[in-house]
């Protein structure tokens, strides 16, 4: 498969060593400010290990001394993590106005963290200096100079984040540049221009970074918030203008709408710019790392995230599928395997023969080039979707449908005689949910009853009670997600219900769909498919 050629200035000047271009991650500090994220020390250690595995150059761990959790993190990270690629970074502020860096307790805490690299946040917007710090513009410059030079003298590498830089540059460009120049002359390795409010656009970033670089001679970095939806573009625009340090967060986590997303930034640098910023082979781990970090922070991975989302290389339209069958590059900007992702074909009422053929190949079902068979499947899918089914998120149910058409009959591990679910409201305000199933399996009639914390859970348990004697593999199956959607009804309160169920056996996960006039019947269909698919892939021969 061909790939997009690298373009831009970095394509002609790939990184010669690890320090010529910095990938700086601030998930543990800035990313943790996202609403809904509350990281324990154990969470932060786990994420730090993932980021080091990915190969970022710097991991900003937090603000030691500001809270006990971050102080503990630095102590444990030093003792428990053998960083292979990344350097640990402590974050803090310049010394207080009127004091000295050598005597400032917050500066002392940065040194005591043991981190080899320290990032200082400094005011570069004149109004912030006067209104937030309540000091003079000259004193602010002295705070930067004193703190940077003190930390450098103590053997620390120092980066300086110029907070609100772009807004400050718009208000008073000369003063904003003087903060950059002061930090650079005091010994800061990199001065980072921060779009703290996230209001900049790419062309504006390019112009400002190029001017500041020419006027100060400092090595520049970029820290972009995503309030205009341009954080990734702004970051790459800064690189185009000469920045050699990018600050990002995993999956774009951060305050308000978030920060520049680490993964599309790194993928663009490596694939589009041709700049080596990760260790050999690390890019192929990107999707896994993204999803692993999402699990740690307990947020569902974004399905439509560039490069690493499960839908990033998913194709639905029949026209696309026909072209992809000829050459995947016709509708994909890169080979998804380069970032550890995979191409997926979505089956819907938009599907044509090419979509079905490609999906069959993806699922390992040989259609044998039978055009009549493929046409039947296409019509079957369209007919089913018209009645409310969807197979885009239910590959397992689609595979069962496909195999039934190929083999001429549906796979059956059991035959349902009847089922019922009862919800009982009691006078004391408690509830009881009970289900009874009557099945045939391996020539035997089984009646089983079970209680659950809801009618669907009771049906799931009753099925297991009935069948685990015949199929012990069911003991490994676990329902991990359950979604209900009420489709538009045609006659007042009469509606169609669609249920999607995700099931795992501890190794793989699969999704099934059911559609019926009520939620319990739809759930039963999805459960039947879930059990059938799981047994099929466990290598169990059908009994019916």
Image (cartoon, rainbow, N blue to C red):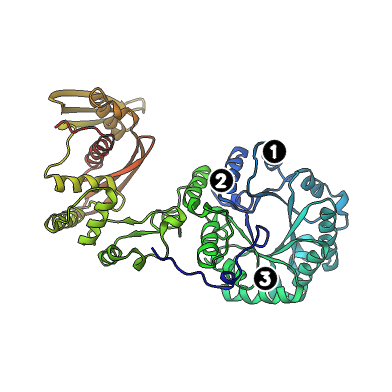
Which badge, 2 or 3, comes first in the chain's sequence? 2
| Res. 425 in view | no
The disc placed on residue 50 is 2
Which residue is disc 1 drawn over? Answer: 72
Residue 226, by quadrant, is bottom right
Q: Quadrant of the N terminus?
A: bottom left
Q: Give the image location of residue 271, x and y in percent.
A: 50, 64
Which residue is disc 3 drawn over? Answer: 167
Classify mark 1: helix, strand or loop: helix
Q: Is residue 267 above or below residue 74?
A: below
Disc 2 to disc 1, C-alpha distance: 19 Å
Q: Give the image location of residue 395, x and y in percent.
A: 28, 48
Classify mark 3: helix, strand or loop: helix
Q: Give the image location of residue 147, x and y in percent.
A: 82, 56
Which badge, 3 or 1, comes first in the chain's sequence? 1
Q: Residues within 10 Å of mark 1 (few under 14, many from 20)?
A: some
Q: Is residue 251 left or right of residue 470?
A: right
In front of the other: label 2 or label 3? 2
Q: How many marks?
A: 3
């Amino acid at each position: 498969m061909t790939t997009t050629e690298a373009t831009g200035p970095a394509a002609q000047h790939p990184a010669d060593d690890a320090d010529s271009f910095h990938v700086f991650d601030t998930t543990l500090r800035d990313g943790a400010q996202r609403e809904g994220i509350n990281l324990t020390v154990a969470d932060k250690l786990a994420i730090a290990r993932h980021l080091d595995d990915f190969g970022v150059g710097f991991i900003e761990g937090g603000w030691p001394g500001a809270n006990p959790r971050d102080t503990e993190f630095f102590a444990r990270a030093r003792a428990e993590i053998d960083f292979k690629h990344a350097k640990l970074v402590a974050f803090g502020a310049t010394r207080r106005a009127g004091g000295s860096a050598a005597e400032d307790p917050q500066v002392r805490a940065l040194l005591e963290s043991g981190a080899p690299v320290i990032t200082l946040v400094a005011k570069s917007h004149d109004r912030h200096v006067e209104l937030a710090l309540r000091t003079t513009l000259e004193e602010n410059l002295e705070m930067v100079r004193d703190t940077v030079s003190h930390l450098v003298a103590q053997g620390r590498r120092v980066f300086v984040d110029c907070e609100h830089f772009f807004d400050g540059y718009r208000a008073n460009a000369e003063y904003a540049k003087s903060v950059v120049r002061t930090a650079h002359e005091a010994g800061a390795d990199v001065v980072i221009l921060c779009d703290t409010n996230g209001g900049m656009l790419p062309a504006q970033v390019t112009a400002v970074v190029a001017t500041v670089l020419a006027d100060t001679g400092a090595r520049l970095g970029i820290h972009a918030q995503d309030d205009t939806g341009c954080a990734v573009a702004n970051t790459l625009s800064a690189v185009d203008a000469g920045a050699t340090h990018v600050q990002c967060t995993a999956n774009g986590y951060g305050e308000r709408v978030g920060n520049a997303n680490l993964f599309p930034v790194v993928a663009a640098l490596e694939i589009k710019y041709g700049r080596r910023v990760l260790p050999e082979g690390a890019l192929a781990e990107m999707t896994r790392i993204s999803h692993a970090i999402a699990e740690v922070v307990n947020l569902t991975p974004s399905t439509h995230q560039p490069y690493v989302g499960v839908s990033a290389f998913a194709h639905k339209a029949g026209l696309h599928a026909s072209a992809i069958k000829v050459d995947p590059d016709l509708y994909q900007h890169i080979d998804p395997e380069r970032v550890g992702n995979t191409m997926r074909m979505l089956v819907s009422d938009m599907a044509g023969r090419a979509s079905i053929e490609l999906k069959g190949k993806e699922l390992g079902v040989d259609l044998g080039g039978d055009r009549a068979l493929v046409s039947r499947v296409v019509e079957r899918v369209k007919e089913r979707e018209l009645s409310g089914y969807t197979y885009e998120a239910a590959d397992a149910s689609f595979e069962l449908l496909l195999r039934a058409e190929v083999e001429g009959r549906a796979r059956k591990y059991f035959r349902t005689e009847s089922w019922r679910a009862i919800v009982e409201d009691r006078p004391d305000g408690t509830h009881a949910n009970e289900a009874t199933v009557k099945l045939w399996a391996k020539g035997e009639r089984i009646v089983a009853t079970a209680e659950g914390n809801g009618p669907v859970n009771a049906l799931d348990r009753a099925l297991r009670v009935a069948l685990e004697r015949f199929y012990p593999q069911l003991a490994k199956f676990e329902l991990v997600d359950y979604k209900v959607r009420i489709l538009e009804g045609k006659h007042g309160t009469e509606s169609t219900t669609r249920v999607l169920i995700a099931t795992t056996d501890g190794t793989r996960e699969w999704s099934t769909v059911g559609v019926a006039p009520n939620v319990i019947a739809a759930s039963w269909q999805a459960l039947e498919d879930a059990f059938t698919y799981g047994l099929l892939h466990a290598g169990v021969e059908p009994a019916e």
